[in-house]
Image (spheres, rainbow, N blue to C red):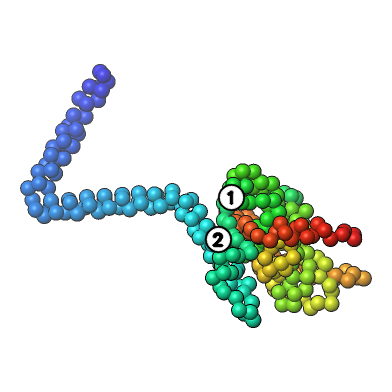
Amino acid sequence: MRNLWIFINRYNAFFLFIIFFIFGLILTVRNNAYQHSAAVNSTNEVVGDVYQNLNVLKKYLNLGPVNDSLAAENAKLKTELLMLKSIDSAKKITVKDTLNNPQYTYLSARVIKNSITLRNNIITINKGKADGIASGMPVISPGVGVVGYIRDVSEHLANIQSLLHKETKISVNLKKNNALGSLVWGTSNFDYRKAFVKDVPNHFKVNVKDTVVTSGYSSFPPGIPVGSIINTSVAAGDNSMAIEIRLFNDFSTLQYVYVILDKYAAEQKELASKVPNEQ
């Protein structure tokens, strides 16, 4: 307390100046119309800027729920778009019935864990059994590109066996000529931006920049863009080509995915189990 008194006593002239300055400023603003108007306008401007910045901060903090809502709405639109594309124009089919009873349904989910640097990469999402997700369901990205298959499922979470996994294999074909092949990753390197298409017969004509899409033979709906060809090679005496592609999907920035629910998946799996394995 003694030190505080010494400090005030030493700088008393300065403190008196501040007090009289503020008092004079208040009197000037109150008793002069012009100064009063200028002060009010300046105060409103400052307060307005503060509220605007607070609103920006509030919107930023609410981006999570907004993104979740947009992802769910986008999943609904993707389902309807896929059904419209699957309508056979040569038949009399009611669009309403098709949309009310679709084969494929998109379910949006948020990525809560991801890896791209391992040999066997796993992605975790915030949806599980309670949301209708089951093992084996295909997963795609919000833009274009395949992500992988559902692997392990708990009540509210699920693991995706990423395309960036040594055991992941997806049936694809070349968009321009429907040449069938198998999409795999990490044949010679582990670049998350690239993959390989194997087992394409070498008599097909393949060019750089040709597009690779899903064939519809491995749970994924047909025609989903996967990537574009960047390199091709044929080994001597081999009947098939090795095709390197650049993936459309960027796994390093993956935040949302769409799990595809196929209402005929169980029926198709049951039929497949009855076919004798001749390998």
Question: Mark number for residue 233?
Answer: none
Label 2: element kind: helix
* Three-letter residue code for mark 1: Asp
Q: Position of residue 88 (x, y in %)?
A: 64, 77
- Foreground pick, 235 / 138: 138
Determine which residue is flagged by label 2: 75
Q: Position of residue 271 (x, y in %)?
A: 78, 60
**Relative to residue 62, is residue 263 drawn left or right?**
right
**Relative to residue 24, is residue 248 drawn left or right?**
right
Determine which residue is flagged by label 1: 131
Label 1: element kind: helix
Q: Which is more foreground, mark 2 or mark 1?
A: 1
Closer to the chain start, of discs 2 and 1, is 2
Q: Residue at x 83, y 67 (%)?
A: 199
Q: CA distance from mark 2 to mark 1?
A: 14 Å
Q: Is residue 163 visible?
A: no
Q: Residue at x 61, y 43 (%)?
A: 155
